[in-house]
Image (cartoon, grey):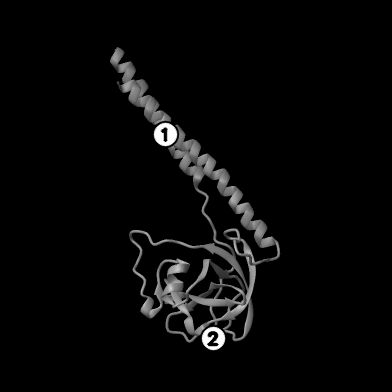
C-alpha cells in the first residue's frame, strides 16, 4: 500500500512540475506577443479585437457619464481609474480607461472627436470576494463592461475595455498606462518546487523500504 500511494503521489507531483514548465513556455509566448505589439503601430479597433492588442479608436468621450473603477494609492494619494464611455458612429460604445486620477481632483477631458490609443483589456466577472459595485455613485470594483454600461444607463457597450496608453499626464488630466501589463513568470520556480517535493518523497520512500527490510 505505501508503494502504491508513493507512486500515485509521484505521478501527481511530477505532472504538476511538467505543467508548470508548459505554463512557462506559454508565458514566454505571451510576453513576446506583448513586446511585438508595443513595437508595432496600433491597429484600427475591430468588432472582435485580440485581447491586449494595441488599437486606435476614434469617437466622442461622454464626460457626463464618467465613472470610477477600483481604488489605487499613489504616493499617499488615494485615486481611481477613470472610465469614460467613448461613443462611435455606427459602432458600439467602448468603455475607455483613461488612467489614474486623484480622488478629489477635478478632471479635464477633451471635447469633440478624439482618437485614443490603448490596449484591449478583456472583461471580468466579479469573484466571491469582490467589493460590491455602487452604480448610483458610479463606483465600480470589477471591470465588467456590460455591468458598468448598464449602471451608466447605456443599452449596449463593447464587451471589452480600451486602456489608454501614453506618457506623463499634464496637471488635471488622467494619468494613462505606460505599457502593457507586466506579467510575472515564476513558473520555473514552481516547477522546481514540485520536482523537489517528488525527490523528497522518493527519498523518504527509499528510507522506509530499507528500514522495513532491516
Helix, strand or loop at disc 1? helix
Which circle, 1 or 2, is nearer the viewer?
A: 2
Task: Say above or below: 205 vs 65.
Answer: above
Q: Which quarter of the rendering shows the N terminus?
A: top left
Residue 117 in percent (x, y) is at 63, 71
Which badge, 1 or 2, is on the more N-terminal residue? Answer: 1
Image coordinates of residue 90 in percent, x first then y, are 61, 74
Which residue is at the front of the view, 106 or 62? Answer: 62
- Residue topped by disc 1: 13
Q: Furthest residue to the top?
A: 213
Q: Around disc 1, counting alpha carbons within 10 Å, would you say few (fewer than 14), some (14 to 19), or many (20 or more)?
A: many
Q: Is residue 147 above or below residue 170?
A: above
In this figure, which residue is indicated by the disc labeled 2?
108
Q: Dot 2: within a 10 Å radius of its alpha carbon, few (fewer than 14), some, or many (20 or more) residues? A: few
Q: Nearer the viewer, residue 49 or 192?
A: 49
In the rendered image, which quarter is residue 53 located in? bottom right
Q: Residue at x 63, y 80 (%)?
A: 114
Where does the image place residue 197, in percent across and percent down from the top left?
Answer: 40, 34
Residue 111 percent coordinates (x, y): 59, 86
Amino acid at each position: 500500500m505505501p508503494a502504491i500511494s508513493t507512486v500515485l503521489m509521484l505521478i501527481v507531483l511530477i505532472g504538476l512540475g511538467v505543467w508548470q514548465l508548459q505554463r512557462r513556455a506559454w508565458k514566454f509566448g505571451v510576453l513576446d506577443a506583448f513586446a511585438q505589439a508595443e513595437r508595432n503601430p496600433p491597429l484600427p479597433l475591430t468588432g472582435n479585437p485580440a485581447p491586449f492588442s494595441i488599437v486606435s479608436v476614434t469617437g466622442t468621450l461622454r464626460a457626463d457619464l464618467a465613472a470610477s473603477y477600483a481604488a489605487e494609492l499613489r504616493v499617499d494619494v488615494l485615486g481611481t481609474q477613470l472610465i469614460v464611455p467613448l461613443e462611435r458612429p455606427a459602432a458600439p460604445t467602448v468603455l475607455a480607461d483613461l488612467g489614474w486620477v486623484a480622488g478629489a481632483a477635478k478632471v479635464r477631458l477633451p471635447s469633440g472627436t478624439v482618437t485614443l490609443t490603448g490596449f484591449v483589456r478583456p472583461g471580468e466577472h466579479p469573484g466571491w470576494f469582490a467589493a460590491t459595485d455602487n452604480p448610483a455613485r458610479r463606483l465600480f470594483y470589477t471591470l465588467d463592461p456590460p455591468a458598468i454600461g448598464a449602471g451608466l444607463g447605456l443599452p449596449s457597450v463593447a464587451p471589452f475595455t480600451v486602456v489608454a496608453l501614453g506618457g506623463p499626464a499634464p496637471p488635471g488630466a488622467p494619468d494613462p498606462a505606460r505599457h502593457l501589463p507586466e506579467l510575472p513568470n515564476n513558473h520555473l520556480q514552481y516547477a522546481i518546487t514540485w520536482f523537489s517535493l517528488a525527490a523528497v518523497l522518493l527519498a523518504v520512500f527509499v528510507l522506509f523500504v530499507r528500514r522495513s527490510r532491516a
